[in-house]
Image (cartoon, helix red, strand yellow):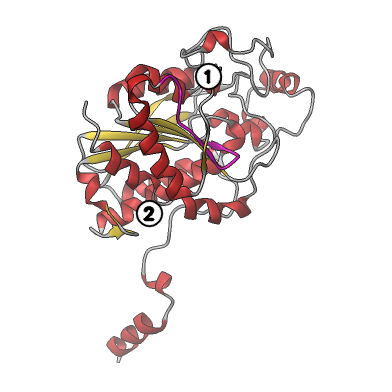
Amino acid sequence: MAKILWIILIVFLPFETVTHAKVVETDKPYSYELLVQDLEKIQVRYKGQVEIKSIGTSHFERQIWGVKLGHGKKNIVLIGSHHGREWLTSIVLMKMLESYADAYQEKKKFGAISTNILNDVSIWFVPMLNPDGVAIQQNNIKSFPIEHQERLLIMNDQLDNFEGWKANGMGVDLNRQYPAGWSALDKEPSTPSNKFYKGKKPLESKEVVALTKFISEVNPSIAIAYHTAGREIFWNFRNGKYLKRDKTVAKKIAKLTGYKLAKPSKDSMGGGFTDWFITTYHRPAMTIEISYLVGETNPPLSVFKAEWKRNRYVGLKLAEEAKKIPH
């Protein structure tokens, strides 16, 4: 009798009931604390498929996590939350990580793409490069030393609402911290601020130092920085003789996501991660801007479903492209 009831339960209960629950929730703001909890669960569930390690710390000692999925000798890197208000990119990357890991563990395709590519090319996820900035933007100010809370208010023009915060915990814009073209960047603001302050010198911020060191270690064939907003892909910065190759890869991702390709600008100044990676490693890199334009704040959670649909195959597609790139 018990056996019959069990069979009935399997047949008639919703599919989610008889399979394990999803780890990454996409219906609430994604904090550093949630990231840590989710990574702990993912490490247990996909132990044979993922490697999780700290690649460094923020200025206020939050860990910057890197997650490797796959067993390939080649690598690609996907980075989220350079800016505090861009934590929706962290959700996209964590959802991608979990979805791919699940399919890879079950030896299944994800959509039309075989996860076997992960035997040749591993995907490294850095879901939240700027955990201090995310905490500030989500108004978790009390997690900082009391004397620094006062500095944060000054950097935020004395506003106690931090929803527009882009910088790291020290008021430096991480995506204006890379050596490629840094000196040409606007010097204003000239002091730490909630956005745009480039710092006194490139590679000043601990987060950027950690990432550039990590990149040199894993030597990726392709690197992606996810940002918000505008549904646009930036891929060009002094690509030189690799212009055609890099544009071909970018066009494939544009077609996959439905995002427009940014037109190359001759007077582009640089300072960003993509600029640095292209000129340092001479391999494809892209800045992928998700969501429609939202102004000086984070995109609403309601946009996640549409952005996930656009981006769900990006990681695996880039892994396929990386396999073709010699180095």
Q: Quadrant of the image for the C terminus?
A: top left
Q: Which amino acid, by three-letter code, is at mark 2? A: Ser
Q: Which amino acid, by three-letter code, is at mark 1? A: Lys
Determine the CA span between mark 2 and mark 1: 39 Å
In this rendering, which labeled residue sits more in front, label 2 or label 1?
Answer: 1
Q: Position of residue 285 (x, y in %)?
A: 40, 30
Residue 293 visible here: yes
Q: Position of residue 9 (x, y in %)?
A: 37, 82
Say few, some or many: other residues with alpha carbon within 10 Å of mark 1 (under 14 / 14 to 19 / 20 or more): few
Q: Is residue 26 left or right of residue 120?
A: right
Q: Is residue 175 above or below residue 99?
A: above
Q: Is residue 221 magenta?
A: no
User: Residue at image x 41%, y 49%?
Assistant: 96
Q: Which residues are magenta?
A: 226-238
Instruction: Report which quarter residue 103 is drawn in.
Output: bottom left
Tag shown at residue 293: none
Looking at the image, which residue sits at the far bottom?
A: 1
User: Residue at image x 27%, y 47%?
Assistant: 47
Say few, some or many: other residues with alpha carbon within 10 Å of mark 2 (under 14 / 14 to 19 / 20 or more): some
Instruction: Report which quarter residue 198 is drawn in.
Output: top right
Report which residue position mark 1 lands on. 266
Looking at the image, which residue sits at the far right?
A: 158
Q: Is residue 235 magenta?
A: yes
Q: Is residue 116 left or right of residue 113?
A: left
Secondary structure under the numbered disc 2 in the rendered image = helix
Q: Is residue 113 above or below residue 39?
A: below
Q: Is residue 23 left or right of residue 108?
A: right
Q: Quadrant of the image for the N terminus?
A: bottom left
Report which residue position mark 2 lands on. 99
